[in-house]
Image: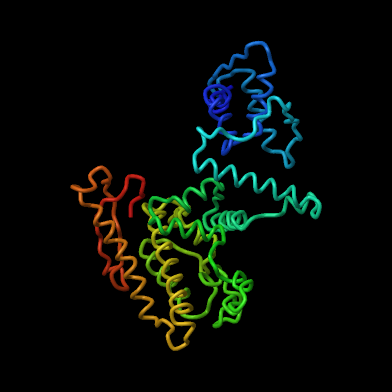
Amino acid sequence: SDSEYTINGLTKYLYEWEQKGFIGIENQNLFKAVSAALKQRKAPVIFVKVKGHSGDEGNDAADALAKEGAQKEEPDSLNLTIPEEYDINGAQLNYLTQATAYKGVTIYRKQNRHKKRKRRHTEDDLQTEKTAADKNIELIQDDIENYQNERPQPQTIWKKATKSKNAMKEQNIWNWKAMHNLFWVGKKWSRIPGYEQRAECRFCQTEENLEHILTKCSKPGQLEVWELVRQFLDLKNIQLPDTMSMGLILGCALTNPRDENGKKIEGGSCIVEIVLRESTGLIWQLRNRHVIQHDNDPEKLPTAAEIENSFYYRINARLQLDCTLTNKYKFEAKLYERKWYLAHGDTHSKMKRISLMTGPDRPGF
């Protein structure tokens, strides 16, 4: 085989994966089935690593079959039955980490939930049943694809949206909660006696879910902030859609802005992520202040000047933080020269170029 991952998975890493119960391993069902088949074989099995596309007859034939399988609309039905004595379930405690345990519990709950509901649902119903996170992942995929004709994979979305090095820790946590629909907004309040009125936006007279707060609410806040974002990014020749979407907001770390010639804009991905995350935080902050602190008082809605000042305050505060990281006496190991292009005022002539150091994995500004 030319797949080092497959060979290592059946030799070098097999024992460790078995002790972990194959939790979190890609294609775990295939690895478990092949491993069980190998254990039933009494004769030795030798794996040989060959170079891909090198004229090896067996490997080229396997590649052709793999290509044929990838082009099928419906996958083949494979017999992955494992004899009971070779079927390994669970993980050993000395190999178990908190992350592995969490993944294992999540997988178990999903499988168990489906088993409990088999009596009430058909097989088609079970296939269409999705969690809030699954729906948000698809939403991010669709909106990012509409924005730049690239459809990200779920693993990439989780990594960049919730573990981004360009974002503050609190921003990554906020994104994780939003993708799992954990914020108490919208319909969740309708289940709490005495608080049913909080499920509705008093200004728009409709359900106040997260999407409404960030992209649809007509009271002062989100409309003004997104217009400021467009003006700000326009100085970098980065265009955003006329109407912001939840998928683009949650998946801002996956954007790769391009110029009119189709060339990637240097530092565009990073600046879009930072500005969109800061703007999302501002909209959320303005909403919470008016709804919770001011109890939806129409006399205390934020003015356009307050919103604009808050926006530039957050952007400049983030810039100042990155400037602090240029202190080579404290952060020498992390220094890497990049540039911010910040707008001061309303015109290009008032732009000021500020050179600073940021992390090595962070694209330039």
Quadrant of residue 314 in the image?
bottom left
Q: Nearer the viewer, residue 240 or 330?
A: 330
- Asked if one can make out residue 3 in the rendered structure from this viewpoint, the answer is no
**Which residue, as the protein is rendered here, is positioned at the far bottom?**
299
Which residue: 60% across, 47% down? 106
Quadrant of residue 361 in the image?
top left
Q: How is the image coloured?
A: rainbow
Which residue: 36% across, 49% down? 362
- Asked if one can make out residue 216 in the rendered structure from this viewpoint, the answer is yes
Q: Position of residue 246 (x, y in %)?
A: 54, 63
The N terminus: image quadrant = top right
Which residue: 43% across, 76% down? 289
- Is 46 rendered above or below residue 290? above
**Which residue, as the protein is rendered here, is positioned at the far left?**
329
Q: Position of residue 105 (x, y in %)?
A: 60, 45
Report the label total. 0
- Is 208 rendered above or below residue 156? below
Q: Nearer the viewer, residue 290 or 293?
A: 293
**Which residue, as the protein is rendered here, is positioned at the far front?**
93
Q: Position of residue 54 (x, y in %)?
A: 55, 20
Relative placement, left or right, of 213 versus 81 is: left
- Is 231 rendered above or below residue 339? below
- Is 289 rendered above or below residue 81? below
Relative placement, left or right, of 178 versus 81 is: left
The C terminus: image quadrant = bottom left
